[in-house]
Amino acid sequence: MVMGSNPMSALTSTKPTPIPTHEQDDHDSPSSTALLSFNTDSSSSSSSSSPSPSSNKTLFVSLILITSIALSTSFAFAFLFFTSSSSCSSSSLPPLTPSLVPRPLAKLKRPIVLLLSSDGFRFGYQFKTSTPNIARLIANGTEAETGLIPVFPSLTFPNHYSIATGLYPAYHGIINNHFLDPLSGEAFYMGSHDPKWWLGEPLWETVVNNGLKAATYFWPGSEVKKGPWTCPVGFCRHYNGSVPFEERVDAVLSYFDLPSDEIPDFMTLYFEDPDHQGHKVGADDPEITDAVARIDSMIGRLIKGLEQRGVFEDVSVIMVGDHGMVGTCDKKLIFLDDLAPWIEIPKDWVLTHTPVLAIRPPSGYDPADVVRKMNEGLSSGKVDNGKNLKVYLKQDLPSRLHYAASDRIPPIIGLIEEGFKVEQKKTKRQECGGSHGYDNAVFSMRTIFIGHGPRFARGRKIPSFENVQIYNLVTSILNIKGAPNNGSTTFAESVLLSGA
Ligand SMILES: [Zn+2]
């Protein structure tokens, strides 16, 4: 791992150069596309054993008959089932008729993608309560069966921008929700709109680069003017968390009332919930259940509006979250001051305490020495909860985290076990809540992925994958050329229905 040899490269270039793709690093990324060996549909298996037409005509006719009978029977059962139970869950649905080719557009003249994010929608929230609208997208679309894997750190800004660019945070530059530029000392915060922070090429820029139109209704980075993306009035909303969700949905729907050639080809839509509640009350609380039900009702409002305009089946709706959520509580704390017998860590060395511990010691201190002394203390058995924090030089972090190749990432990173928090010192304040940002291999950090539209098979389940794959998925649906990124070039074709 080459660190620091070219300190400016990651900061100054808007097109990061050394971008490892999934093809290159599948060996250390067990949860990536290497798992994409899913069995597409029962009918697709016939292609592997292609029988000769002369000897198998009878067999083929018989199979058609058997399939027809089986389908009729299953539909009959499905009918009985639905009429006898109105509260069935999506998992009870019979497999829908597989279709291996894209469905033709009924009304729209070209593909349109709506990318929708529900912040902090932990994988599994969809089972907390009745979510008929999300269930409808799942039943008629393609779902990551065990959730979408965020990038590390599993925080809001790094992840939304990874979804938008297909790049890991080290390459797109937003390495945390807030951080310091080590060269200028300048601070990045969530309201920073200077393009110098935002590297890579987000989807809205790619779309415009290809001569198409984009519209963003909130998304981290979308207000930043980059290349031909000027954040145009009426098609690029400036973030305002007090805008009611209904108003956001209705604004997106109104784009479909424009003359055909003015409808944006790519749109984003963002909801702060259920992340907002998750931080206050953790992942398991009636407040979360209510927030999930509300998000579901917004999906219902969206579906209804698209149906009224006759375009629901034409639009590619991609519903994602940025990360999950885990409960944190007062007993799960690690205090840096407890490490004093081994090494003193002053507060001003620490960029973020939790859930990613990020430390930049001043010059004159050897980061490797700091790491060694910290880990000595943490593993001594004398520091409360010490075994739940492990400190690394960034270049020694597991390579699957892809969290080293940027000078914005401080030299010392601590990985904290899920649900634990690092604080500077003991205080009287005791609190329980929820958090995210932990190792992206932790299951509680997973979120949802559902794709619904002409290029997504109905009722298909695919293995979990990292959100850097979504960029190529969108450019493939729009049939445009994307920028280099960390996603796999084969992912989109393995997930999307393709014309044949
Ligand atoms: Zn978030």
Image (spheres, rainbow, N blue to C red):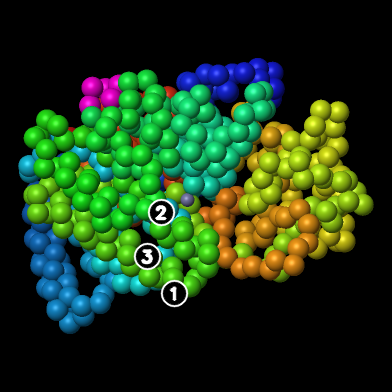
The amino acid beneath tag 2 is: Glu
- Between the residue at mark 2 and the residue at mark 1, the CA separation in whole angstroms equals 17 Å
Camera sees residue 388: yes
Real-space Cα separation, disc 1 to disc 3, in angstroms: 10 Å
Q: Which residue is rendered at x = 9% and y = 54% of the image?
A: 308
Residue that label 2 marks:
272
The residue labelled by disc 3 is: 292
Span shown in magenta: 208-212
**Left or right position of 79 against 147:** left
Dot placed on the residue nearer the N-terminal end, 1 or 3: 1
Q: How crowded is mark 3: few (under 14 residues within 10 Å), some or many (20 or more)?
A: many
Question: Is 53 situated above or below 462?
Answer: above
Q: Where is residue 132 in the image (x, y as percent from the top left)?
A: 26, 67
Is residue 40 among the parts visible in the rendering?
Answer: no
Residue visible at 22% across and 46% down in the picture: 251
Q: What element carries label 3?
A: helix
